[in-house]
Image (tube, rainbow, N blue to C red):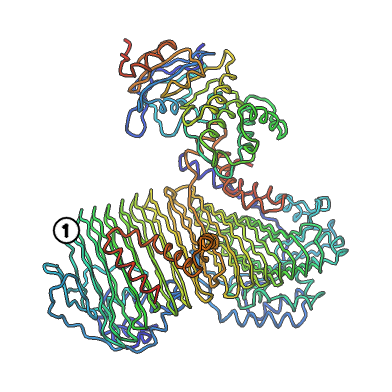
Amino acid sequence: MAQEEINKAVSGEYALGFEIDIETDVVPPGLNEDTIRFISKKKDEPEWMLELRLKAFEKWKKMEEPHWAHLTYDSIDYQSISYFAAPKKGPESLDEVDPKILEAYKKLGIPLEEQKQLAGVAVDAVVDSVSVKTTYTEELNKHGIIFCSISEAIRDYPELVKKYMFSVVPMTDNFYAALNSAVFTDGTFVYIPKGVRCPMELSTYFRINALNTGQFERTLIVADEGSYVSYNEGCSAPTRDENQLHAAVVELVAMKDAEIKYSTIQNWYPGDENGKGGIYNFVTKRGICEGDNSKISWTQVETGSAVTWKYPSCILKGDNSVGEFYSVAVTTLAQQADTGTKMIHLGKNTSSTIISKGISAMKGQNTYRGLVKIGANAHGARNYSECDSLLIGDQCGAHTFPYLESKDIHGQVEHEATTSKISDEQLFYLRQRGIDEESAVSMIVHGFCKEVFSQLPMEYAVEAKALLELTLEGSVG
Amino acid sequence: MKLLDLKQKTVEEAAALLGVDPKAAALERFAAIGLPTKKSEEYRYFQIEKLFEKAYRTLSYVPHPIEESDKIVITDGMVTHAPKGMRIYYEQCQAIDMEHFDPLYYLGHLLSPHVIKIDLDGDADVEIEHRYTQSGALINYRIVLLNQANRHSTLFESFHAEDISDTLVLYGYDIFVAPDSTLRMLKNQNMHDNRYAMVASHRFKLDQRANAVIKSFDMGEDMGLQLIKAELDRYAHIDAGHLLYLNNEAQRGTVSKIIHKGEYATSHQEAKNILDGHSRGIFDALIKVEHSAKYTKAHQNSKAILLDERAYMAAKPQLEIYIDELEASHGSTTGQLDPKQLFYLRSRGISEVEARKMLVIAFANTLIEQVKDHRHQELIKQTFDEAFYR
Amino acid sequence: MKTLEIKDVHAKIGEKEILKGLNLELEPGKVHAIMGPNGAGKSTLSKTIVGHYDVEVTEGDILYKGKSILEMEPEERALEGIFLSFQHPVEIPGVNNAYFLRTALNAKRKHEGKEELNAAEFLREMKKYLEMLGMKADMISRSLNEGFSGGEKKRNEILQMLMLEPEVIILDEIDSGLDIDALRAVSEGINMMKDGKRSFLVITHYSRILDYIKPDYIHVLKDGRIIKTAGPELVAQLEEEGYESIEEEA
């Protein structure tokens, strides 16, 4: 197949590239103590939170931006970013939600007015930085489940927040985590009480909307003993010329016998084929399997952003705890992704599975970077990693950088990686059976990603497939 | 001297400390990369700073008369013995690689007033013995090796240290493998008793259709790291194998970057690591396929067996690929001896200790038996046995 | 009207000319066997008809139902009814066998203005043939050709042929790597497709398959041209005397 045609096929126009015009409350660009005080005041936060933010800010000022990832991008001017934007109208009910926001959601395929009919899905939608609407709260309340914005949690559940926030990702964990700790504007808090199985999928859609506005969410999910929750995060942002920074932090805590399933679909604006525009996505996601027999499972489908720096990780502290990481990362146009996971085995008989599928097309650069560490006391720990790369075209790159460190004699660490391309033979076979070229490419790519998609909750698997088609095909879907 | 003194020095300061021309190209590269620290990716798992903190005696390198022998002997960095007719020279290094990843490659060149240049004639079969006799010293030397086109030569390296202690050896090769030739390099090393630590920094440049077979058999209980950079031109082929058998406090391994530059080049790299005691094994290997290297085939594999609760394996097999017309894979496993195999042997009446030994030897033999020359194979087996039954 | 007319086709792979003025006409309802020594251009002929990327046609034309197909994409030729059973069907990991076949079938149905089959209807159809071909039910859930044995791959080709109901069927070395049971099942499938309208092009190196699929014509392909066309009686002569004995007809 001619290279030009492939490029056309894989560079689907960014279908979510629209901008909604809502009056936003934006602080002037720049970052100093006053900005942080302003954010804290706007969020109506208690004094202790402000103090923590200021502490994080002090630490952040002394830290250096990391440059070890396989990424090249223009340096970020942190003083030119505006750190707060909130829609001016504060809606009380669905009816009061700005129709333009509803319109935006419609284009995203999640019409708010139909949400109540969306079986079993509660949505905490975040436009820019403020949680606009939380539904299904009542239903969840019946089970004692807390599902609210992080700002509300800081006000209403200070004990829980004080106990768990920064417990998995310390505020000085890394440069971006420290920045987030100082300026985070909103995000989600989930608490599942002992023995409760969350009856529905919890979801959040994030959008980056206002010009030059960084988005700094913070998510904290605590699953108490014997509980279960499946949480889905989906993202998209309108077309934009300047690079926008996104530095989120997600912390998960799974107590004894608890299970957390965290799924992400990330579809932010990737920039153009010359690398102009697009989101810079520097995310710290980490979960701790605190108690015995607990489980944390990360599934991600990353198709967007100009630059992605993201390593959802598991600290397997409890004995017999399980960590999983399933990832599909697509880089096309001039996108760059440096993503992977860390599995830190501390407890006995802990096990982890890593399945990573990287797809590179056009000028995309896709890097898997993962650490598997088996501690000296993690007797009987097991890890299996599989990292496969698919290359489409000869301008792209696929890189695999696993770090495998084993200190335990009874541990087993296995890593496998392959690199392949869509073979002309495979394409031709499908076409000989009457399947057109784009469908054939898409079919092969889906086949390649199958193991990961099968981990997504049903409705998200459908969305992920559609998204992949959109990213890779343009005219199809 | 203390190598740590070179930390974060400007070109001028480093030039003064090393007593070299501040305009030396190697110096610029050295200053740009900087002395390795524990944060350097290439030295991430090797406690290099421990070696830098010690004060070493520096040696003066004055050419000796060379005695005739059946092998080349390099004693404390100077050639003392050589076979008759062997072409060996001391000279200024003409071709320093300006793109090497390892700062100690440059430091080695800066510290060496001259390099030992060896021209291999025809289908040479040469042994180089490295001899160390000085305690508390920094022994530093570099070797440039050339072979001839369309010829097949073999180089067998052995190491001998007298009853010395606390010495650091920095050495390495710049090797140019000629078109259509084969160079086979076997390294047989057994370090123990803290006689010396070693950082070996090599560079291989493979011309069109050149073959390099690099097999290292690395055993013992001290600190040693080999850093290898290899560049492959069109149709070149490299076959690299690394056996580690470590015990006690050993910290040993390989850091390599194999770079495919020309079309149709192939690389195969395999590491077998057996770690006992409190040892640490390192296999940090990158295969990079540049945009110009279509139709590359690159395969890499590392297997490790931990025999002691305190042993530690750090494996970092890496692929960096900029082209889609290729075949590449890597794999890595770390584990213990297969309980099923152990059980099978024991059920046939073999004691557990004996069964474990059998399996460890079998594991090591998969690499050792790839050495085709019987004499060399026997020597390596002997070294392995010495280390294993020590 | 002829179903397929190959007119003085010259074709090359890379720089090498393989087909050197090949002429061949397929008649409706007939089985044409192409026989020839290794390297004669048999596989190139099948690749040329289905528009394989390796092949460049430099001269001549191929007409399907009177219309040139040389400018058509491979999938267009397939949708029009040209089917190739590959000599070595490629493996495609992760692509479900049934899903693939349903996609192909529905593409064809859509092309013909028919309604697409839903999953249940499709499976019912497919199961019918699975049994007939002696294929295991797990073929539905496995990945396309992945880990299939030689026999399973060829059965899978025939399954696709039965489902897609093409009009020109090219069988490239369909019997290679088949045991006797598989050969029977595969031939049964092929014979089922004979309806007096479809044309078959059986490309083979050995005559064994022709005991099962009775040919109407034998064409001898040598050095990129058809050098002789005769009735089935030619098979015996080829068996005994080899290809060397065949002289080019004027």
- Name the spot of residue C31 as percent of width and height, x first: 50, 16
What residue did someone put label 1 on?
Answer: B122
- Name the spot of residue B195 as percent of width and height, x first: 34, 83
> Count of labels shown?
1
Left or right, B81 with respect to A314, comes to left
On screen, residue C127 above or below A241? above
Q: Quadrant of residue A93?
A: bottom right
Choose between B27 and A287: the one closer to the eye.
A287
Q: What is the chain letter for disc 1?
A: B
- Name the spot of residue A453 as percent of width and height, x first: 64, 51
Left or right, A294 with respect to A400, comes to right
- Name the spot of residue B251 as percent of width and height, x first: 43, 76
Residue neighbourhood size for the residue with mark 1, other residues' Cα within 10 Å, grouped as few (<14), some (14–19), many (≥20): some
Task: Judge whether residue A347 can be spotted in this image.
Answer: yes
Q: Quadrant of residue A474?
A: top right
Left or right, B182 with respect to C57, comes to left
Amino acid at the residue labelled 1:
Gly
Choose between A204 and B303: the one closer to the eye.
B303
Task: Judge whether residue A338 can be spotted in this image.
Answer: no
On screen, residue C68 above or below B334? above
Name the residue at 19% across, 76% down: B79
Which quarter of the rendered picture does the C terminus of chain A lie within?
Answer: top right
Circle 1 SS class: loop
Choose between C244 and B191: the one closer to the eye.
B191
